[in-house]
Image (tube, helix red, strand yellow):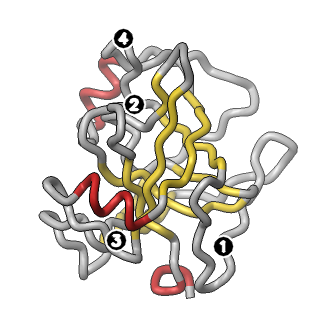
Amino acid sequence: MNLRSQDEAQETITSIAEKEQQIFKVLCYFPNPQFNRSSKENDIMLLKLNDTANLNKHVQLLPLPDSGEDIKPGRKCKVAGWGVTSSGKPPPCLQETIVTIVDRRSCKIKCKKHMKITSNMLSAGGKNIFAKKDACEGDSGGPLICASRYSGIVCFGKGCGKRKMPGVYTRLTEKYIA
């Protein structure tokens, strides 16, 4: 999954202002110094915003996972983003779907041609009879929320919603949240 440039995203997405929205500018960003572009290991970045969010009934904090917590295969999680949909175009509003965590060993086998899956990664996918469920191009950096906890970050995949090919997420481990 690749992020589109900010200019490209602004040109292709028309948004409607909501009274609850809060808009911030990114002052600087801090990629993980151990990030490996080819392996996608340590694909996580901190952003410094120009202001602090006003917490209210529409904007709340998500708790981080307990140190060392791993997500069990079969767990249903939510993923959200502005990435392309089955139409191949970005959506007019934030999209959310439910995916199921895939056993890491199974994911390693399915992804071995494309990428090495490590203990700092989670895999998830999902389909129903009507639609494919997955993160897609443009969703990178978005949240994976499991049991009301911010558990992962959309990282990469091979296609979007392909049968037997889960999406891969950076797992929020003690390495990143301690």
Mark yes or no: residue 154 visible. yes
Q: Amino acid at mark 3?
A: Phe
Q: Residue at x 46, y 86 (%)?
A: 175
Q: Residue at x 46, y 65 (%)?
A: 48
Marks 2 and 3 sit apart, C-alpha to C-alpha, by 23 Å
* Nearer mark to the viewer, of 4 and 3: 4
* Nearer mark to the viewer, of 2 and 4: 4
Where disc 2 sits, the SS reads loop
**Residue holding disc 4:** 87
**Residue holding disc 2:** 83
Q: Earlier in the sequence, mark 2 or mark 3?
A: 3
Q: How many marks?
A: 4
> Would you say 140 lies left or right of 99 here?
left
Q: Are marks 4 and 3 in contact (CB under 8 Å)?
A: no
Q: Amino acid at mark 4?
A: Ser
Compared with residue 4, is residue 176 higher up or lower down, i.e. above or below?
Answer: below
* Nearer mark to the viewer, of 3 and 1: 1
- Classify 10 Å Cα crowding around label 2: few (below 14), some (14-19), many (20 and above): many
- Classify 10 Å Cα crowding around label 1: few (below 14), some (14-19), many (20 and above): many
In which quarter of the view is residue 3 placed? Answer: top left
**Residue holding disc 1:** 65
Compared with residue 83, is residue 3 higher up or lower down, i.e. above or below?
Answer: below
Q: Amino acid at mark 2?
A: Gly
